[in-house]
Image: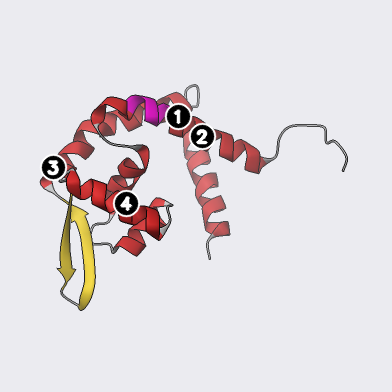
Amino acid sequence: MTRTEGPPSLLYAVKQVELAVRARLDERLRGSGITVPQWTALTVLARREGQTSAELARNAFVSAQAMGDLVAALERGRWITRTPDPAHGRRVLIGLSDEGWSLIERLAPVAAEVEAIMVDGFDDAERADLRALLNRCRTNLSD
């Protein structure tokens, strides 16, 4: 194997950004009683309520097993509701409780602050370009 010169790969750069965002969110959420994976799940539900645990796991980027633990913790915090799916008797749909919505409203500025730090010095066009490029990457990698 030979050594390579030049900048790190895009994959490495994306992972480093992910880790830096996670560290900043961990730091800022520490006193709130919620973890970053729990926050992610709640924000996914805020965008689209009424997901099964399996759907929520896919959309929150965790395994089905990890989502089981997350759902249990979110229930203990009274941040979610679980209701039978009227269209499919065995499915249970997860949504945000009033407490969950309140938590989202209280912590949204914290997440916005981390995002603002991440794009500090970017103009509006650069922010829009970054969002569009990242969405294209996601789409390209989708099944």
**Residue that appears at 54% across and 34% down:** 17
Mark pair 4, 3: CA separation: 19 Å
State the CA–CA distance, disc 2 to disc 4: 22 Å
Kind of residue indicated by mark 3: Glu
Task: State yes or no: residue 138 in magenta.
Answer: no
Vertical placement of residue 65 versus 130, above or below:
below
| Relative vertical location of residue 87 with respect to residue 114 in this rendering, above or below | below
Of discs 1 and 4, which sits in the foreground? 4
Q: Determine which residue is flagged by label 1.
A: 23
Residue 129, given in percent of the width and then of the height, sits at 52, 40
Which quadrant of the structure image shows residue 124?
top left
Q: Nearer the viewer, residue 29 or 72?
A: 72
130 with respect to 100 (left or right):
right
Residue range highlighted in magenta: 23-28
Q: Amino acid at mark 2?
A: Leu
Write the residue at 64% across / 39% down: 12
User: In the current view of this chain or complex, which residue is farthest to the top?
Assistant: 121
Dot 2 or dot 4: first in sequence order is 2
Quadrant where the N terminus sits is top right
Q: Earlier in the sequence, mark 2 or mark 3?
A: 2
Please give the residue where the numbered disc 3 appears in the rendered image: 99
Name the quadrant containing residue 68.
bottom left
Cα gap from disc 2 to disc 3, whole angstroms: 29 Å
Question: Magenta span: helix, strand or loop, mainly?
Answer: helix
Indicate left or right for 43 with 63 as reference.
left
Residue 19, disc: 2
Mark 4: which secondary structure?
Answer: helix
Label 4: which residue?
69
Q: How is the image coloured?
A: secondary structure
- Label 1 or label 4, whichever comes before in sequence order: 1
